[in-house]
Image: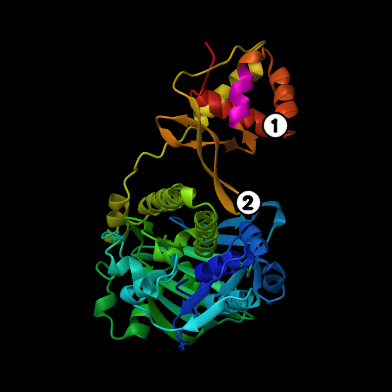
Amino acid sequence: MLGGGPAGCAAARLLAQWGRRVVLVTRPATVRHPLGESIPPSTRKLFDLLGVGPAIESAGFVRSTGNTVWWGSGAPRVEYFANGEHGWQVTDDRLEGILRAAVAAAGVDVIEARLTSDDISARGAAFVLDCTGRGGVWARARGLRVHEPDLRTVALIGLWEFGTLDVPDASHTLVESYESGWAWSVPVGRDQRLVAVMVDPRTSNLAKAEGARAAYLHELARTRCFRQLTAAAELSGGPWGWDASMYSASRYADGNVLLVGDAGSFIDPLSSAGVKKALASAWLAAVAVHTALERPAMRDIAFDFYAAREREIYTAFRRLTERYLADALSAHQHPFWIDRAGALDDDGGADDVPAIQRAFDRLRDAAAIALRASPSVRIEPRPAVSGCHIVLEPRVVTAALPQGMRYIRDVDLVSLIELAPASSQVPDLFEAYCRRAGPVALPDFLAALSTVLARGWLLWP
């Protein structure tokens, strides 16, 4: 295991819990400036899986209720987490401290050393997980990193002391787009916030400013809301520079090495999903390695499954970034936004919400149904996660979905498609499904059935 950040610690902890001998190699400790991380409530499941939930809860992190955003508009958009849930505002050093303690408690051997890719190969480990983040020891040495040349971004981050803060909720992540970049801020303690500006060094005036502090304050002065928020605050630390450019990998599995978390890909910080993505990547990598060790015949299937999921996640976040950029471009006609919008042209993501709504309306209004499976749909075995293993299970497979799909809204699509032709009424189909696959909420069942109809997997003449 290479790297002692969230991904490396998470994968090491899981594999040790599953009875594997794990050696975690991390760089010797150095003094560095902490980064702020906004973690959504949905990450709780991963914290609990790792057994660090109680430690996270007692760490004293700021508990956030959501985000306040000025994006392409001067009017704030206040977004609260669903169901009154709370996320966490953390610094990476404190989060890593909790995860390192969990690794030690699991009996992982921790070694401080700087290794090259040749050193890694010479050690003869059965499997290696590269969790070295942006450093990407293995990815860089093997030429696996794929940069987004039109999406270069530098973050300048400063620590500010605030008195009062005129925002709807002081626990929120604050985000503002402006002419030549965007700014964000997270609280990291009582009356303290990290404030960052995200710029492209090729299109901003960054290089023309005299020193990092002048460049940072120059960019903040170009904002509207952040300029007002920091007017009465004091810059007590920084600014520090940090490369925040997006990238992916040509391969996420390379022989016996898996690229995990930021070592494989880095998504735009706009998503506030960096830590969650790293932990999820580590979980799946650990499952793939555990499967390969316990069931060697499944090794290639497990590694291919891991690599496909990493590609899918990066693509999904890339599309999300595209939507953010399009919203900002409408208000800011600057090369920072124009270049990015051009670099992230739509790559085929389809919005089938209208078709799903039409299918639902037809189901609601119909006196009877007469459904049959499409000839283009097959039920075939495909890899999926079951506990701490990757297994083959029946999935719905089409030409457009060769990897297959099993569930929508926790509804088993295989059972749904197999049962549908035998029912002439939706209530009868719902009852038959619950008898076979177990109870589900009716709204979820109807949503899954409408989706299957909208995608043409079930036909209704």
- Spatial CA distance of label 1 from label 2 is 19 Å
**Res. 243 visible in picture:** no
Q: Residue at x 54, y 23 (%)?
A: 453
Q: Residue at x 46, y 79 (%)?
A: 26
Predominant secondary structure, magenta span? helix
User: Front-most of 187 and 222?
Assistant: 187
Q: Is residue 407 left or right of residue 151?
A: right
- Asked if 426 appears above or below 118 in the picture, the reply is above
Q: Which x, y percent locates residue 376?
A: 44, 22
Name the residue carrying label 2.
387
Name the residue carrying label 1.
437
User: Front-most of 107 and 217?
Assistant: 107
Q: Which x, y percent locates residue 91?
A: 55, 76
Magenta stretch encompasses residue 416: yes
Which residues lie in the magenta part?
A: 413-420
Magenta stretch encompasses residue 362: no
Q: Which x, y percent locates residue 428?
A: 72, 18
Mark nearer the N terminus (1 vs 2): 2
Q: Which residue type carries mark 1?
A: Ala
Q: Quadrant of residue 448?
A: top right
User: Front-most of 132 and 334?
Assistant: 132
Discs 1/2, front? 2
Please tell me how many numbered marks the rendered image carries.
2
Q: Which residue type carries mark 2?
A: Gly
